[in-house]
Amino acid sequence: MSIGEQVFVGDGAVIHGPAVIGDRSALFPYALVGQVAQFANHHKYEARVEIGSGTILREFVAVNKPVTAAATKVGAGCYLMARTQVDHDCVIESFVKTATGVTLGGSVHIEEHAYLGMNAVVHQGLRIGRACMIGMNGAVTAHVPPFTTLVDRRITRVNAIGLARIGATEADIARIDAYYRAGEMCDADDPWIRAIRDFRARVAPAATARVALTS
């Protein structure tokens, strides 16, 4: 067990090692870190959970041990609201936020700065791209490419607010929107467009969410 400096552990919170808890993290009351995976006949008590520095786990958040990977990981600066469920082998990159009641199936990968709305559910093995927004009560059944907003299993627009927060200009956002509407008409050397193409290359040939831009 490795617990960093200035870590807050609330009443009733439980940590099962092996685990790494980064500096300035907080486990609110009844948060549960390191319970075995919710996977029948695949209980690995010696497997590890890693929580990055400055990450907040609110009440009744559960982060379970891995089954196949070296660790289930939650990156630095994340904020997981009450009753978020992170199951086996998930990887959550830095600065991800989940609203109350989010459920991640096993082996889900969420890239940095994504936001998942209240009660969103992500099917196991899927990847959520950088700075995505998943609408509340959303059922995610396909990979979601970067910088998009998913509502009712469709990409309805680019996530302009999220993009602005990570430094995209209005011109950048317009190019991303144009790419999702017209594909190959955009500059392949644009770093924002390259990030989308790299994401699609990583998940190919698996299905990605349907693009149906509405504005």
Image: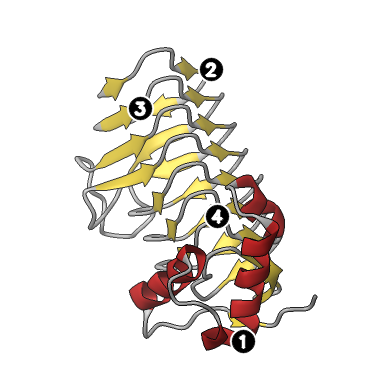
Measuring 48% from the left and 41% from the top, which residue is drawn there? Answer: 62
Sequence-first disc among 2 and 4: 2
Name the residue carrying label 3: 21
Q: Secondary structure at mark 4?
A: strand
In the foreground, 192 or 209? 192
Name the residue carrying label 2: 11
Question: In which quadrant will I find the C terminus?
Answer: bottom right
Q: Which mark is residue 103?
A: 4
Q: CA distance from mark 2 to mark 3?
A: 17 Å
Sequence-first disc among 1 and 4: 4
Residue 116 x %, y %: 62, 54
Sequence-first disc among 3 and 4: 3
Task: Select label 2 or label 4 by which is in front.
Answer: 4
Sequence-first disc among 3 and 1: 3
Name the residue carrying label 1: 182
Q: CA distance from mark 1 to mark 2?
A: 53 Å
Disc 1 + disc 2, Cβ < 8 Å: no
Q: CA distance from mark 3 to mark 4?
A: 21 Å
Sequence-first disc among 1 and 2: 2
In-image side of 165 versus 66 (left or right): right
Name the amino acid type tagged 2. Answer: Asp
Question: In which quadrant will I find the N terminus?
Answer: top left
